Amino acid sequence: MRAAVLVAPSTFELRDVEPPDSVTGWQSIDVSACGVCGSDLGIYDRNPPIPEYWPGHEISGLRDGRLVVVNPLVFCGTCRFCAAGRENLCEAPRMISHHAPGGFAERVHAPEGNVHPIAASADHAACVEPVASSLHVLSVAGPLEGRRVAIVGGSTIGLLLAQLARQAGAAQVGLLARHGFQIELGERFGAGPVDFTPDVTLVAVAGDGSGLQWASDHTDTQGHVVLVGNIRDSRPLTLKWIVERELRVSGSQRYTKAEFLDALARVEAGSLDLDALITHRFPLSEISRAYEVAAAKAEHRSVKVLVQP
């Protein structure tokens, strides 16, 4: 089978490889679609690279001719957090694409309990994973009904949060984004400009701590700031504001099994506008181009980019 392997910074090699060895309790899935995530872009140009990295974790495919979606997070099931239903904080997690070959390939293996039938298109099914991540952000944020919610970042997660916050009953939803097309999409989803003082700020900006800085400076007294994404910047925050205004700052890490199934149900129900988010599709042979388009958001007006082996 063919698989895309990251062999050097910003360099994929398309290889003919043997399918992963069969493991008891794991199933083989023929990949239909796999999304390029912001975390993938962060690893793409990493130097030195992860040796022989085989990425892709937003996976849909066929098992015995039936469409399924793969939960890429393999939880231990025995630690204190798994026992409490908080698998997102598992003390010994594994992830398909990091600890096992990922979905940018013609076939992928996953534990039986992580493979779920889904009544949706393959492209929509590949969006279940980022929807689950977004649902966990809302879980951390708490009830949004009647709240004034600002979302910082026009990524896939940020634009999903705009839709979900509206559905959760937020009184106002505003979006801060770098690019005009992201703001246009936010407006389509009911998120206008942030011309109000938010009492909840959801920060979905990967790699840059500036969003959290904005949130700490602008969120209302006794407000709540929730941070999601691969933050690599360690710039200082305005701690004075956090203390004096009694702000709460929380992180959002992964998602639980229940949230993944909730995301699956929402995708099946068609309650989210995913077609507006899926902007580009590429065959596996053009995976380098897929990454380039996903990274150059302003040039290509890209949001969710899918690879279809």
Image (cartoon, rainbow, N blue to C red):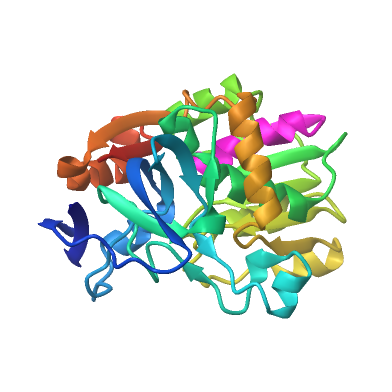
Residue at position x 63%, y 53% in the image: 214
Occupied quadrant, residue 191: top right
User: On screen, 125 above or below 41?
Assistant: above
User: On screen, 145 above or below 214?
Assistant: above
Q: Is residue 159 magenta?
A: yes
Where residue 202 sits: x, y (%)? 67, 48
Where residue 41 sits: x, y (%)? 34, 55
Res. 155 visible in picture: no
- Extent of the magenta region: 155-173
Extreme residue toward the top, this view: 188
Depth order, front residue of 58/50 = 58
Q: Is residue 13 magenta?
A: no
Residue at position x 86%, y 54% in the image: 221
Where residue 94 sits: x, y (%)? 49, 71
Residue at position x 19%, y 48% in the image: 288
User: On screen, 93 above or below 124?
Assistant: below
Res. 263 visible in picture: yes
**Image quarter hosting the C terminus:** top left
Residue at position x 63%, y 41% in the image: 263
Report the magenta stretch's main SS.
helix
Where residue 211 sits: x, y (%)? 57, 54
Occupied quadrant, residue 30: top left
